[in-house]
Amino acid sequence: MRERPIEELGIVGCGGAGFPTHVKLAARNIDFLIVNGAECEPLLHKDKELLKHHTADFLKGLRAALDLTQAKQGLIGVKKKYGTLLDHLGKAIDDPRIKLLPLGDFYPAGDEYELVYEASGRLIPFGGIPLNIGCVVSNVETLLLLGRGQPMITKSLTVTGKVPHPLTVEVPVGITMREALSLAGLRDLAGLTVIDGGPMMGRLVDDVDRQVVTKTCGGLIALPSDHPLTRRMGRPQKDNSRIARSACDQCTDCTELCPRALLGYPIKPHKAMRTAQLAAFNDQNYSVESVFCSECGLCSLFSCPEDLPPREMAMAAKKAHLARGVKLTDWQGAPAVHPMRPARRVSIDRLLKKIGLLDYDRKAPLTPVELRVERVRLPLKMHIGAPSLPLVKPGDRVQAGQKIGAIPEKKLGATLHASISGRVSDVSADAITIVRE
Ligand code: SF4
Ligand code: SF4
């Protein structure tokens, strides 16, 4: 069905990590190819909008992925609350290998470990990947791009928050975040702070004129700079450490509600807090199980009754232990689901209320936009692996869709394509810039 091999399309996982798709789909004879349409980050609507409006291309991509991986079954994970979308997909599915996987409205339903368990009843082994238990997980947009069979030169994202018209748009990769925000009617950013990604796992944007929409950007959320969430996200780590040392009473609520702990992984964020109080993170005896933290943020933003930063302390401990060579495969045995998991999962409604985003929970329909892009800046690394090798030099004329970056030999990586036609104005160590002529 495709004229070019997948690695020549430059498609990467669009759900956050940016794993090169041609490598993921090199798996063979798997049991389940699971589509991650859970979109559990509050306020984001990209995946369900794409499933609704680009159903045929998405299903074409899913069938191609099933053929490639020789998967026995393809499962499309979508939340039960989107009943109309599930009906729509149910009518469109024309392949007996493909089934719907209705999901509960919990955070983080889209976490790979959670999704694999819900889909297959299997748990990823300590230090393993879904493939170890016969599963491959792929994102909605990734499969849609595969179905189109074209180079990845656009990115779909939701632009929402304190904006005049929340929407989901498809834009050329490499436009500035300011340009993307303007599509939602936001021109004046005074008093606002922008999050790249979702409110739970996203990052604050430093410079909307410098930072660009990459292949992994799924959403931009503008919130008041004095909103508790943005203030919390902007808190320096030294302040988090000081707070962690001062106030934790070791109630263990953070551990009891931790999604990874409820699946049976040995993570204990309250121990990371204790470590912050008592020891250095690289002390091999302390909170070493923090390496299992997914960084989902539930403990810091929802579970802790004192608004303390267990996620940030678990992340610091994880970084220190991984740096000294701890591996997740060091653990013996297998995870076992906690019997209280069904009762302790956190619904999106409760989460929205706790993090103060109920007022921003608005629809963001997929909207065609006219955007004359004068310049794009294409980072050489928008994926897991080695940066792409530039194939162009300043002054070269390029066409939209032309390959301008290659995968380094024998390395994990992704090809890069011009997202607009124009002239290459700059090739630096980290990006290629193209200006329209
Ligand atoms: S960080 Fe918060 S939830 Fe966790 S043990 Fe300390 S006080 Fe309890
Ligand atoms: S961020 Fe907190 S809740 Fe999430 S996995 Fe890590 S320790 Fe658990």
Image (cartoon, helix red, strand yellow):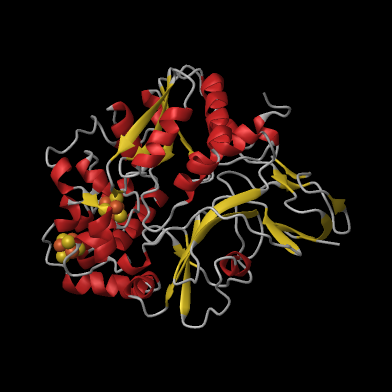
Quadrant for the C terminus in the image: bottom right
Image check: 243 left or right of 411? left
Image check: 98 left or right of 406? left
Query: Eyeballing the image, is 247 above or below 295?
Result: below
User: Residue 372 appears at what percent x and percent y?
Assistant: 73, 63
- Compare residues 5 and 183 and report the one nearer the observer: 183
- Which quadrant of the view contains residue 130? top left
Quadrant for the N terminus in the image: top right
Q: Residue at x 13, y 45 (%)?
A: 343
Seen from this angle, which residue lies furthest bottom? Answer: 190
Query: Eyeballing the image, is 253 above or below 27?
Result: below
Query: Eyeballing the image, is 426 above or below 1?
Result: below
Q: Residue at x 28, y 54 (%)?
A: 348
User: Residue 208 appears at what percent x and percent y?
Assistant: 58, 71
Image check: 49 left or right of 327? right
The answer to whether one can see residue 19 in this image is: no
- Compare residues 60 and 31 and report the one nearer the observer: 60
- Compare residues 284 and 108 and report the one nearer the observer: 108
User: Residue 338 appears at what percent x and percent y?
Assistant: 15, 38
Count of picture labels:
0
Q: Residue at x 39, y 23 (%)?
A: 134
The answer to whether one can see residue 62 in this image is: yes
Image check: 323 left or right of 351? right
Q: Residue at x 58, y 34 (%)?
A: 57
User: Residue 215 appears at what percent x and percent y?
Assistant: 59, 50
